[in-house]
Image (cartoon, grey):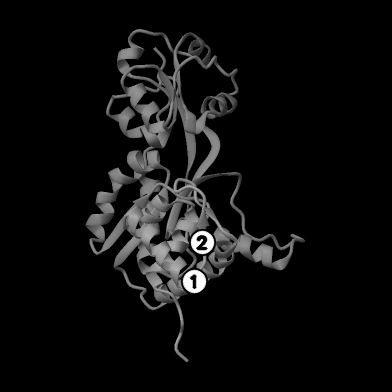
Amino acid sequence: MKRRLPPLNALRAFEAAARLGRMTAAADELSVTPGAISRQVQVLEASLGQRLFEGSKNKPQLTHAGQTLLPALSAALDTMEAAVRAVSDHASGTLDVACFSTFTVKWLIPRLFDFNALYPDIEVRLRTNGPLGDLERARCDLAITVETGELRGADPSDTQPGAQAAQQAADAANTLTLFPERLGPVLAPSLAARIALHTPVDLAAHVLLQSKTRLNAWQMWASAQGCALPPLVGTAYEHYYFTLQAAVAGLGVCVAPWHLVADDVQAGRLLAPLGFCESGYRYVAKRRPQRSQKLDLFCAWLLAQAAQSPLPSAPIHS
């Protein structure tokens, strides 16, 4: 019997928009314009004779019909995608990698030339939006994120249900530990020449820069250092990258992860007079469990890059 389905492009556009909650996010994912997403959704609504979205264009809400259609459609598209991946496993093509934007700019992109030189037939597409802890929702092959605590598989003595233990073991098997996060105060040489910063107590007299995306950074560093939290008098920037740039410009002292400032410290653009200490976070890469030659190559390369990353030197006190 002939299948009676609406156009596949219309189904894909609706699923992406409904899953991500915004037409613009769906457009980014499918590499089309927001107007194209809107038109495809209208095509689907006309085919079904049902409204799928309601409310404003900026914050569309799913109707009852849309809520009914989304989970089944997402599951069907996931099944199709898995089947395509299963029969197209080769060491070429596209990899979708998601991670924090500052990590992308300061750590990953400066190293990608090496992967591109080794594997020119593999295109790495980077994205910084979407839920990094959920590969399916983020629609990516690998996500680099942070975790706390120790990674563990299933414990034979655990009394939790078998399915839950099996899922925990699978998550552990598909999680690569890159490196622990090390935090430390950094400042520009021009600022260091004008102020005294030899002990954590000295921070109380200076402007401390913050990022709105991680307002707990100074608290985490103080706790790890075992010292009192200095008074947070200074600008809170919208993004961590802005905070790092402000530090390079000499606008204040920033507390930063070593892997984000290692190149700046080694080049002399930033100084770290108090050194770095582990924060309790660790950077991990979560990969899709399906077999993939190109993903295997990228994961091996990523682990090698993490292992080769320089460690911070001990603080130098004048």
Q: Do tag 1 and tag 2 residues touch (Cβ < 8 Å)?
A: yes
Q: Is residue 109 shown above or below 169?
A: above
Task: Judge by depth and name the residue closer to the eye, 239 or 92.
Answer: 239
Q: Amino acid type of disc 1?
A: Leu
- Tell me if mark 1 has few (under 14), some (14-19) or many (20+) residues whose alpha carbon lies within 10 angstroms of its own: few
Residue at 34% across / 55% down in the picture?
35
Residue at the disc numbered 2: 52
Residue at the disc numbered 1: 48
Residue 262: x and y in percent read 35, 33
Q: Is residue 4 left or right of residue 91?
A: right
Q: In the rendered image, which quarter contains the C terminus? A: top left
Q: Is residue 271 shown above or below 318?
A: below
Residue 279: x and y in percent read 54, 34
Q: What kind of element bears circle 2?
A: loop
Q: Is residue 172 left or right of residue 91?
A: right
Q: What kind of element bears circle 1?
A: helix
Q: Is residue 64 visible?
A: yes
Q: Residue furthest right?
A: 159
Residue at 57% across / 25% down in the picture?
219
- Tell me if mark 2 has few (under 14), some (14-19) or many (20+) residues whose alpha carbon lies within 10 angstroms of its own: many
Q: Is residue 261 shown above or below 254?
A: below
Task: Judge by depth and name the residue closer to the eye, 251 or 35.
Answer: 35
Residue 114: x and y in percent read 26, 51
Instruction: Indicate the quadrant where residue 238 lies.
Output: top left
Task: Judge by depth and name the residue closer to the eye, 103 or 73.
Answer: 73
Residue at 37% across / 32% down in the picture?
241
Query: How many callouts does the rendering have?
Result: 2
Q: Amino acid type of disc 2?
A: Leu
Q: Marks 1/2: CA distance? A: 9 Å
Task: Judge by depth and name the residue closer to the eye, 113 or 58.
Answer: 58
Residue 56: x and y in percent read 48, 47
Instruction: Indicate the quadrant where residue 104 lies.
Output: top left
